[in-house]
Amino acid sequence: MTMDDSRINIIELKSGQRNSRAARAVSRSPLPGEIPLIDVSPIYTPGNTEGLARTGRAIAEACQRIGFFYATGHSVAPLIVDNAFSAARTFFALPLEERLRIKLNDRHRGYMPMGDTTVPGYAANLHHSFEMALDLPVQDPDVLAGKPLHASNVWPELAGFRDAVEACYDAGCRFGFHLLRAMASSLDLPDSYFQALYRDKPLASMRLLHYPPSPDPVDAQDDFGIAPHSDYGVLTLLLQDETGGLELLTRGGEWIQAPHVPGAYVVNIGDLMGIWTNDRYTSMQHRVRNTGERDRYSIPLFYNPSFDTRIACLPGCATSTQPAKYAPERMGEYLLANFNRVWESYKRPTPGD
Ligand SMILES: O=C(O)CCC(=O)C(=O)O
Ligand SMILES: [Fe+2]
């Protein structure tokens, strides 16, 4: 397989098992219930305190044990999901020159070419992506002020693409916003605790990802679709197609497959949730190996609160025997510290620019 672009950027992801044999170990099928399937529909019924508490308890169990769960009953219409995947397939089938017309900008919107991201210690990830986030008008005061990450999206000239992607983004954000009530309940916090931090311009960004088929990295040069990493934000809501290839590291140190479950989102917690909960909910590593014959598409939504949110140990998560382990972080600055490593190389002129 040829790389679209030979420049390699670094996405500094927490990768505890960097390039070790364990990180390349073969995966197994999950045991029944090992990645729990949680019906989250009570999040949509105001006043259903019992249902919300039940969902919260299931989420607490999942987050503490494995850091991932499948969510059903999320109210995102199948047609919205299908349309977004169709849009992704059409976009990645465009000639490279077309995709490069909207190359990733300094507000982290646009097309990120194949081979442009690596997890330290690994070969370049074998995927490329379309990146978008909250779409703010040019006259928005934060956009005018040049506040980082606040911008309008950029779009390819492709009929129907924008509508399909925006519908998926809006529906995913609505789901995330409701899910925050159950996340709060899972931590014995008032239902609206997290929602209050997401009301004003949340840093919610979505990627359309394409992974071409690639050789098995266990025997080859670590050519993962995406190498082992944990997500650095708060909450990730992932749609994946039927291809499979997503794998999770269990707390016992085994890699297990997280196959496509029809109609379900894969939900996982990121590193910032570990800071918030003092590691009650610790992010877990995951990776993608697309070793079959098929192209794989996925759509993660990184659902994070507003730029100025201060992420510090939550009430109830520190005790006298377990004091807060982490210094507080500011949401936007924390994300920027991670993104900047990518941006640096995008600011450099490349041949043909
Ligand atoms: O494509 C997937 O299933 C996972 C993507 C992922 O882990 C990421 O973008 O952080
Ligand atoms: Fe990830």
Image (spheres, rainbow, N blue to C red):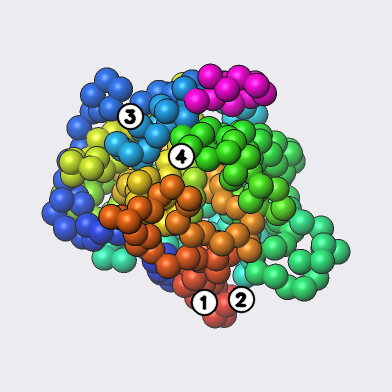
Q: Which residue is the site of mark 4? A: 187
Residue 313: percent from left, percent from top: 45, 56
Work out how far the residue at label 2 is from the one at label 4, CA to CA, in angstroms. 50 Å
The residue under label 1 is which amino acid type? Glu
Dots 2 and 3: beta carbons under 8 Å? no
Callout 3: CB less than 8 Å from ligand 1? no
- Which mark sits nearer the N-terminus, 2 or 3? 3
Q: Nearer the viewer, mark 1 or mark 3?
A: 3
As measured in the structure, the alpha-carbon distance from the residue carrying label 1 to the one carrying label 2 is 16 Å
Q: Amino acid at mark 2?
A: Asp
Q: Which mark is residue 35?
A: 3
Magenta run includes residue 111: no
Q: Amino acid at mark 3?
A: Ile
Quarter of the image for residue 327 reads bottom left
- Residue at x-position 61% and y-position 76%: 353
Q: Nearer the viewer, mark 2 or mark 3?
A: 3
Give the residue type that dot 4 points to.
Answer: Leu
Q: In the rendered structure, find residue 353 and report the number of the disc placed on it.
A: 2
Q: In the drawing, does residue 179 fall left or right of residue 64?
A: right
Element at badge 2? loop
Q: Which residue is mark 1?
A: 344
Q: Quadrant of residue 57?
A: top left
Q: CA distance from mark 3 to mark 4?
A: 20 Å
Q: Which one is in front, 21 or 134?
A: 134
Q: Residue furthest toward the bottom?
A: 348
Crowding at mark 1 (Cα within 10 Å: few <14, some 14-19, many 20+): few
Image point 47% across, 30% down: which residue? 56
In the drawing, does residue 164 fall left or right of residue 293? right
Q: CA distance from mark 1 to mark 3?
A: 37 Å
Q: Which numbered disc covers residue 287?
A: none
Q: Secondary structure at mark 1?
A: helix
Q: Which residues are magenta?
A: 42-53
